[in-house]
Amino acid sequence: MKSYPESVAFLGQFGRFQQVVFLLLCISIVPNGFGAFTLVFLADTPAHHCRVPDVNLTEDWHAAVIPVRVVNGKEVLSSCSRYRLDVVRNLSDQGYSPEVDVNLTSLQEETCQDGWIYSKETYQSTVVTEFDLVCDNQWKKPFTTTIFFVGILAGSFFAGQLSDKFGRKPILFITLALQTVFSFIQVFSVSWSMFTVLLVINGLGQMSNYMAALVLGAEILTGNVRLLYSSLGTCFGFAVGYMILPVCAYFLRDWKSLMLALSLPCLVLFPFWWFIPESPRWLLCQGRVEEAEAIVRKAARMNKVRAPQVIFEDYIVSKPKESQPKEPHSILDLVGNFEIGFMTMILCYVAFTMSAGYYGISYNTTQFHTNAYISCFISAAVELPAYVSSWLALRYVSRRMSVIGSLLLAAVPLYFIQLVPEDYTGLSLTLEMVGKYAITTGFGLMFAYTTELYPTVLRNTAAGICNTVARLGSCITPYLLELRSYSPFLPYIILGSLAVLAAFATVLLPESFGRPLPESIQQMRKRERIKCPCIPKAETPVAVVLSENPKS
C-alpha cells in the first residue's frame, strides 16, 4: 500500500494550496501567543498603599499615617497597613507632630480598612486593582494564573480526543470561538469570581486551538514543508502574537481596553473556515476516501497539476475487506500496550518539565527590567532565534539528541545564576535568557517529536495527552515562583534539576528522524525497537517504538 505522502506526491510540496494552508494556519495561531501571556499585564500588581479617608489630619500626620518599610534596601510605603486612624486623629487634634513629639514605631497598626490607592505610573487599571487582589486577597493573584492553566489543561485533554473523533478542522474553529468569545465577555466581569470562571472557559480554547492547528497542518503538508510548518511556522505564529502583546499593552494601559483589543480582531479568522480543508489523512482513517480525494483534487487544481484518475487506489481496493466494523481507538491505547505506555510516560514527563521551565522563566521576566513592557518584549524576542534553532535541529540533527541538548543547556545557566554576585544583574539576565532560549528550543522540538511518534489514529489524542501533562507543569508555575520568598534561587534549582532528569529520561526514547509517519498501531509494532537498559534481559524488554518522519 502506498503511503499518504507517496499518494499525493504529484501535488508537489509547496504549491499554492500548501502556501494557503501554511499561511492561514500560522495566522490562526497568533492569538495563542498573546492569549497565553495576557495575565502578565492583566494580573500585575502596581505599587499601592492604604487609602486614608478625608478626616481632620494635619498635613504632617496625613503624610505619616502610612508606615515606611525597607524593601531590598529601599524605603517604600507599607502596602497592607497603616497606623490606627483613631489614634492618629487624636494625636493630630492635640497638636502633636510625627517624629518630633511622637515616635511612630510605637504606634499600633491596622489593616487597610478603606481600600487602597494604586499607582497609575504603569497601568491605569489591572484585574488586581479592579478587584483588590492584594494583602489578605493576594493569594487570588497566583490562583488566577493557575486557574487559567487549569482551563488550558482541560481543553488539551478533551480537544485531542474530540479532534480524533470529529475531525481536526471543527475542533480548530470551535476552540478558536471559545477563546475569542469568552475573552470578550471577560471585559464585563463584575467580580473576581466571574472573571475566573470566564478565564477557565477561555483557557479551554487556548492551547487546544494551537494543537489542532499543529496536527492539521502537519497532516496536510508533506516533506520538508511539513517540518518547516511544525517546527518554525507554528512557533513563529505564536512568537509574533507574544510580541504583539507588550506593544498593545503599552498603548492600552486599561485592562478592559487591552482585552477588547486582543479579542475582537480574532473575528477575522473565522472566514478561514472556507479556505482550510479537513485533514485527508484523518478522512482516510475514517474510511471517507471520497472526501479525501475531493480535497486532494481541489488542491491539484489550485496547484495547476493533473491528478491521477484514482488517487488513493490502495485505500479503495482494501475498502471491501473492511466491511467489518472499524476497531475504535481511545486514550486507553496509549497505556494498554506496555511499549507505547512506556514511551508516553517519558514524553509526558519531558513535556511537564519543559512547560514548567518555559512558563516559569517567562512569567519571571518582569523581574528583568523596571519596565514590564520591555521585559515582556525581550522574553518574546528570544523565542525567535530559539525556534530557528529548533527548526535547524529538526532538519539536520536527531530528535533525541536535540531534546537532550536543549534540556542540559537550559539546566546549566539556571544552576549558575545563584553563583552570580548581586551587583552583576546583567550577567544574571543573560544566564536566564540563555535558559529561556534553550527551553523554548526544546519546546519547539517536543511538539514535532511527539506527533512523529504516534500513528494517525492516535496522533491527536497522544499530542493532547502530552500537552495536558505539560499544562500541569504550567499550573504549578505561579506557586513555584512564590518560593522566591524563601530563597531567590530555589525556583531555578528546582527547574534545573527537573531538566537534568528529563535529559536522562529522553535517552530511552525512540528516534524518529528521517522515518515515515506511522498510519496505524500495527505499523508502530512492526518497527525497530529499543530495549530499556534498566530492565534485565530475563524480563519482558521495554521496547520503545521507533517513530517515523517529521512531525504531525
Image (cartoon, grey):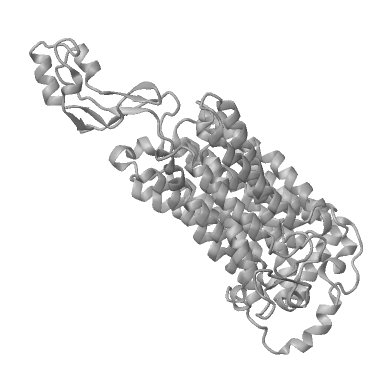
Vertical relation: 344 (above or below) 267:
below
**Residue 245, percent from left and from top:** 56, 37
Report the front residue among 338 and 551. 338
**Residue 290, percent from left and from top:** 77, 74
Vertical relation: 321 (above or below) 476:
below
Residue at 87%, 68% in the rendered image: 6
Instruction: Note whether residue 238 is visible.
Output: no
Residue at 69%, 39% in the rendered image: 384
Vertical relation: 548 (above or below) 186:
below
Q: Is residue 134 left or right of residue 459?
A: left
**Residue 296, percent from left and from top:** 81, 65
Q: Quadrant of the C terminus?
A: bottom right
Q: Quadrant of residue 89?
A: top left
Residue at 50%, 61% in the rendered image: 154
Q: Quadrant of the N terminus?
A: bottom right
Q: How many badges with numbers are in the image?
A: 0
Instruction: Note whether residue 137 is visible.
Output: yes
Residue at 73%, 65% in the rendered image: 510
**Residue 334, percent from left and from top:** 61, 73
Q: Is residue 543 left or right of residue 125?
A: right
Q: Quadrant of residue 247?
A: top right
Report the front residue among 505 and 171. 505
